[in-house]
Image: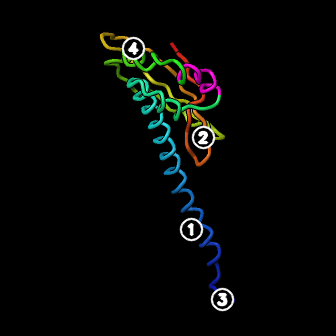
Amino acid sequence: MCCPSGYDDMRKYRVLLVLLLLLPMHAIAQKQDVEMVAMSFFDATSAGNVGQIRSLIAGPLLESVKVLLKENKEYPEFLRDRYEGATAEITNVSMLSDGEALVDMAVTFQGGNTPSYMRLRMSQHKGGRWRIVEQRQVY
C-alpha cells in the first residue's frame, strides 16, 4: 500500500473541486465571446463593413444575405446612413445547450428615443468561434 487510507478519496474530491471552479469561468468566457461577436456585428453594420459582417455570420443568415453583401455596391453606404449615430446595448444573453446562444439587443437610432429590439441567435462553429445564424426584430 503506497498511500494513506482515504488519500484516493481526497484526490477525487480535489479534482471535482477544481472542475467545479473552472466550469463557471468557462461559462463567463463564452458569454463574453458571444457579447463581443454581437457588438462587433453592430459596429460592422454601422460602418458598412460588409466583409466584417460576412465574417461574423453563418448558416441561414449568411445564405439569406450573401448576394446583398457581395454584389450590392450601394449597400455599405446604405448601412452607414441608416446606422449613423445609432447606439446598441445588449439587454440579455441566454446561453443554451449544444453551443447555441441568444442575444437580445436594443438599438437606438439617431434622433430616436424608443429603441428597436433585435434578437441574434448564435451557434459555436469550428475552433469554438461564435457566428450569428439568425437575426430578427423582436418588438
Three-letter code for the amino acid on which mark 1 is drawn: Arg
Where does label 1 land, which residue?
14
Mark-to-mark CA distance, 3 and 1: 19 Å
Write the residue at 54% across / 20% down.
71
Give the extent of the magenta segment: 60-69
Q: Residues within 10 Å of mark 2 (few under 14, many from 20)?
A: some
Mark-to-mark CA distance, 3 and 4: 72 Å
Residue 94 in the image: above or below residue 67: below
In front: label 2 or label 4: 4
Give coordinates of residue 91: x percent, y percent: 44, 26
Q: Mark 3 near mark 4, Cβ–Cβ under 8 Å?
A: no
Kindly state the secondary structure of the residue where label 2 is placed: strand
In front: label 2 or label 3: 2
Question: With 20 as the anchor, is 112 left or right in this view?
Answer: left
Q: Residues within 10 Å of mark 3 (few under 14, many from 20)?
A: few
Question: With 90 as the anchor, is 68 left or right in this view?
Answer: right
In front: label 2 or label 1: 2
Three-letter code for the amino acid on which mark 3 is drawn: Cys
Where does label 2 land, which residue?
124
Q: Residues within 10 Å of mark 4 (few under 14, many from 20)?
A: some
Q: Mark 4 near mark 1, Cβ–Cβ under 8 Å?
A: no
Residue 70 in the image: above or below residue 99: above
Mark-to-mark CA distance, 2 and 3: 45 Å
Mark-to-mark CA distance, 4 and 1: 55 Å
Write the residue at 60% across / 72% down.
11
Ranked by sequence position, the earlier of labels 2 and 4 is 4
Asked if the magenta segment contains residue 105, the reply would be: no
Q: Mark 3 near mark 1, Cβ–Cβ under 8 Å?
A: no
Residue 62 in the image: above or below residue 25: above
Q: Which mark is residue 82?
A: 4
